Image (cartoon, rainbow, N blue to C red):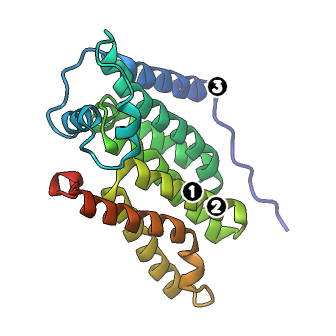
């Protein structure tokens, strides 16, 4: 039986190109964090909620509300944590996603994201979307790993990261997580008859409880409004 041809390793030029693109993307994200005008949308709302405490129980609101506003670099302090969390999650996604999609596919996905105009702009802002993007991505990836090799490690990672996404992103993150988990569970159970829907959505139990509690608290405290879904 003939052996399968080995996949050629990336050339040194290609690896150098990847490092250059990664460095320039990170540098571009960092430039201007302390002086670019506040985005009059989600960012202005988050900054207002952090200072007034009117934003409900979002984790970024509680954390950013502790920062002093009389510091010369207060805007940098508001924007940097969300960006660093996203970069850390992207690094973890490379490690977790490579066995699923292949290293080349993951790297090309990161290159496309770095070259996109919207993502670098979004990472320069202090918004709930920036805080929840990374945990959502990792939770979905951990779910795929859990389906591929059901182990407590991946189940708890998917569950805890989904919970973190809800705590940072609020109800929009909860709805995104719910739609992805349920639709994927339905598709997977229909495609593979031996897999139950209950097994696929098991990591959703804790995030679901947290999301419902989040919804109830927002209703009771009067913090539920359509701008929360922007």
**Residue 57 seen in this snapshot:** yes
* For residue 30, side relative to residue 16 (left or right): left
Residue holding disc 2: 156
Residues packed near mark 2 inside 10 Å, few (<14), some (14 to 19) or many (20 plus):
some
Q: Determine which of the numbered discs, if any, sits on residue 5 in the image.
A: none
Looking at this view, is 92 or 102 the one in front?
92
Residue holding disc 3: 12
Residue holding disc 1: 160
Up the image or down, 152 lies above or below 37; here it is below
Determine the residue positioned at 37% across, 70% down: 179
Distance from Cα at disc 1 to Cα at disc 3: 38 Å
First in residue order: circle 2 vs circle 3? 3
Helix, strand or loop at mark 1: helix
* For residue 136, side relative to residue 79 (left or right): right
Work out which residue is located at the far top of the displayed protein and give it: 72
Q: Do the residues labelled 1 and 2 touch (CB within 8 Å)?
A: yes
Q: Quadrant of residue 180?
A: bottom left
Q: Are marks 1 and 3 in contact (CB under 8 Å)?
A: no
Determine the residue positioned at 20% across, 26% down: 38
Helix, strand or loop at mark 3: helix
Residues packed near mark 3 inside 10 Å, few (<14), some (14 to 19) or many (20 plus):
few
First in residue order: circle 1 vs circle 3? 3
Q: Where is residue 79 in the image (x, y as percent from the top left)?
A: 35, 27
Distance from Cα at disc 2 to Cα at disc 3: 38 Å
Up the image or down, 69 lies above or below 177; here it is above
Q: Quadrant of the N terminus?
A: bottom right
Q: In which quarter of the image is residue 9?
A: top right
């Amino acid at each position: 039986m003939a052996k399968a041809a080995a996949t050629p390793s990336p050339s040194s030029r290609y690896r150098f190109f990847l490092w250059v693109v990664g460095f320039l993307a990170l540098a571009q994200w960092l430039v201007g964090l302390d002086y670019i005008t506040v985005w009059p949308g989600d960012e202005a709302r988050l900054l207002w909620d952090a200072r007034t405490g009117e934003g409900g129980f979002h984790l970024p609101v509680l954390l950013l509300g502790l920062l002093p506003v009389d510091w010369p670099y207060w805007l940098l302090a508001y924007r940097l944590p969300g960006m660093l969390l996203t970069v850390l999650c992207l690094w973890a996604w490379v490690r977790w996603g490579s066995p699923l999609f292949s290293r080349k596919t993951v790297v090309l996905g990161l290159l496309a994201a770095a070259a996109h105009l919207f993502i670098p702009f979004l990472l320069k802002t202090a918004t709930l979307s920036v805080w929840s993007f990374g945990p959502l991505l990792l939770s979905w990836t951990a779910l795929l790993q859990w389906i591929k090799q059901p182990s407590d490690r991946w189940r708890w990672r998917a569950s805890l990261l989904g919970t973190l996404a809800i705590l940072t992103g609020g109800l929009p993150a909860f709805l995104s997580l719910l739609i992805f988990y349920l639709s994927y569970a339905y598709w997977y159970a229909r495609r593979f008859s031996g897999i139950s829907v209950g097994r696929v959505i098991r990591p959703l139990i804790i995030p679901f409880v947290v999301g419902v509690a989040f919804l109830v608290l927002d209703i009771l405290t009067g913090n539920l409004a359509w701008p929360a879904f922007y």
